Image: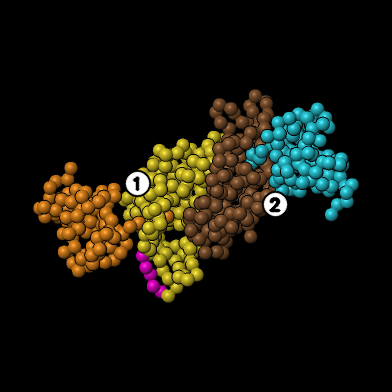
Chain colours: A yellow, B brown, C cyan, D orange
Amino acid sequence: MARIRVQPEDFDIGAEFAALTAGRSDIGGIGCFVGTVRSNADDRVAAMTLEHYPAMTERAIAGIVAEAERRWELLGCTVIHRVGRLTAGENIVLVLAASAHRQPALDATAFLIDWLKTRAPFWKKEEHADGGATWVAAREADDAAAARW
Amino acid sequence: MARIRVQPEDFDIGAEFAALTAGRSDIGGIGCFVGTVRSNADDRVAAMTLEHYPAMTERAIAGIVAEAERRWELLGCTVIHRVGRLTAGENIVLVLAASAHRQPALDATAFLIDWLKTRAPFWKKEEHADGGATWVAAREADDAAAARW
Amino acid sequence: MADADAPLTILYFAWLRERTGTSEESVTLPAGVGTVAALIAWLADRSPGHASAFANRRTVRCAVNQEFADPATPVGPGDEVAFFPPVTGG
Amino acid sequence: MADADAPLTILYFAWLRERTGTSEESVTLPAGVGTVAALIAWLADRSPGHASAFANRRTVRCAVNQEFADPATPVGPGDEVAFFPPVTGG
């Protein structure tokens, strides 16, 4: 019952919350994370392109969601990840996790984004203001965050 | 620069995200929590009334937000808490915390809702399907969650 | 600074409001009542409803001038003192 | 089960795609190439681009039939084997 989508288009955060909770009164809390394209001051990122492995991506995300559902009592879950070229300030990823109580909703949200960062086949190439473009290197901090769980 | 509101009306989650991030490209992640009125199976809650201490509420929330801003590098923060009578399935509270990175955004979100539950002057009275109404007792688990920080 | 005869405003919320039968009252403190703890002991004698509201003091929380307070917090003329159960928002 | 002569499909993503100059190629394995590690060693000899892509094997990740794999994972005829850098989504 999880909603999983990989798409070039933006997502509508309010509509995704509404779809997750529509007609339900067993939910007590919804955790959410939205990742966006950040253009920091010292190394200006004008845009990035997200490449993925289409035959594998949704399967990998479904596996991550199944793991979250095994660990926490979730009443619904949404993961939307954009691909293609995204400019600074645009949304990249949406994670929603609903539960009867706040703690599982918040924990599952953090788990889902940590594992998406380290276990789903996406790669970011950043375009810099000087015209160069570089593949983003995986961060050890992300591996450490994912390994906590 | 935090947005704090205490109001009887519902909030528009998508609009609050948009207001927090509009025109910005320094944000890398937004954490969010939405609390809703839960009607569980064994003790059906038809509705609840949220009472608060108007002269103190916004000040108390501002103090909690200031503490979050002291602990994490936040780029924006929104807390909206509803008051009055709310029926099962309705939204109660919205927390948003934006940061350059996901970890501070998620941690600040969890902190804000934990402290709102234990340090902001709101009281819930639940109406049960049998016609009775009872004041919700504070949960030790909430105190423990708030004391983690 | 409020003058020495200024009344205190007392506010009650949730079941303390229900048990005392009032959401707000104005009181003038007798000599010797200078802390939250002393104020509670004095208020509890005002009516059976007040006595019931303050019967189990471990379940009563307090704010003085919109800041959380404890039994030792001083109270005086002109203050706004609120009594309520542990909070349950969020 | 694919027959013994069926080719493998090799996919490259991100900078492995750029260095090899291809996103997809079909190869027929020689005898003795039965694991991811052996496949990498064999692929690295196909062109200078391939050699560059696999130069630092610690930075290369792999999936066999859309599941993450490691150097010891078996590969065989009909499999889809993908090579890519550590993932950076989210």
C18 or A122, nearer to the observer: C18
| Residue at (55% x, 64% y) in the render | B24
Residues at discs 2 and 1 both on one chain: no
Q: What is the residue that sits farthest to the right in this orientation? A: C5
Q: Quadrant of residue B86?
A: top right
Q: Secondary structure at mark 2?
A: helix
Q: Nearer the viewer, mark 2 or mark 1?
A: 2
Percent x, y of residue D23: 27, 61
Q: Amino acid at mark 2?
A: Arg
Q: Which residue is mark 1?
A: A59
CA gap between label 2 and label 1 equals 47 Å
* Residue visible at 20% across and 66% down in the picture: D51
**Number of numbered tags placed on the structure image:** 2
Locate residue B80, reporting x and y percent: 64, 49
Front-lying residue, A103 or B133: A103
Q: Is residue B48 left or right of residue A78?
A: right
Residue A103 in the image, given as x and y percentages of width and height: 51, 41
> Given the image, on which type of amino acid does mark 1 rest?
Arg
- The residue most toward the front is C32
Residue at the (37%, 68%) spot, across then down: A134
Q: Is residue D74 above or below residue C60?
A: below
**Is most of the magenta stretch helix, strand or loop?**
strand
Q: Which residues are magenta?
A: A131-135
Residue at which label 2 appears = B59
Any magenta on residue B110? Answer: no
- In the displayed orientation, state which residue is furthest to the left: D31
Residue B136, quarter of picture? top right
